Image (cartoon, rainbow, N blue to C red):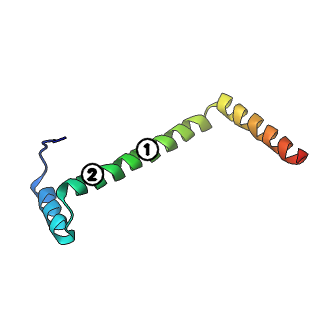
């Protein structure tokens, strides 16, 4: 798939520099950069969801109940 975009001249210069310096196609640099960015977003979403769950009394009670059950199972073994 082809995508057309506009980027600042400085970013294009850096893209050209690193592409030439490391012999990596520009498309691969975009692919790697987007993958890293998406992973960062995914981690931020997890953090946000854990923070939201931490403030939710119902979620806290469910987690505590689950932990109690898990500890009982461990004691039985």
Q: Nearer the viewer, residue 43 or 19?
A: 19
The residue beneath circle 1 is 42
Q: Earlier in the sequence, mark 2 or mark 1?
A: 2
Residue 4: percent from left, percent from top: 12, 42
Q: Residue at x 24, y 57 (%)?
A: 29
Kindly identify the residue that appears in the image at 16 percent across and 41 percent down. 3
- Which quadrant of the rendered structure holds the N terminus? top left
Q: Position of residue 18 (x, y in %)?
A: 19, 66
Q: Secondary structure at mark 2?
A: helix
Q: Is residue 22 left or right of residue 69?
A: left
Residue identifier under label 2:
31
Q: In terms of image quadrants, where is residue 65?
A: top right
Q: Is residue 68 left or right of residue 51?
A: right
Spot occupied by residue 20 in the image (x, y as percentages of width and height)? 15, 68
Identified at 23% across, 52% down, the residue is 30
Question: In this rendering, is residue 31 above or below 60?
Answer: below
Binning the other alpha carbons within 10 Å of mark 1 as few (below 14), some (14 to 19) or many (20 upward) gives few
Answer above or below: position of 53 versus 37: above
Residue 21, by quadrant, is bottom left
In 3D space, how far apart are the residues under numbered discs 2 and 1 (Cα atoms)?
A: 16 Å
State if disc 1 and disc 2 touch (CB < 8 Å): no
Helix, strand or loop for disc 1: helix
User: Tag 2: Cα neighbours inside 10 Å, few (<14), some, or many (≥20)?
Assistant: few
């Amino acid at each position: 798939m082809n995508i057309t975009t506009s980027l600042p001249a400085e970013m294009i210069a850096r893209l050209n520099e690193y592409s030439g310096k490391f012999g990596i196609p520009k498309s691969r640099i975009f692919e790697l950069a987007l993958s890293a960015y998406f992973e960062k977003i995914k981690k931020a979403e997890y953090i946000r969801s854990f923070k939201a769950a931490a403030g939710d009394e119902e979620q806290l009670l469910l987690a505590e109940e689950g932990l109690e059950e898990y500890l009982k199972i461990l004691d039985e073994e």
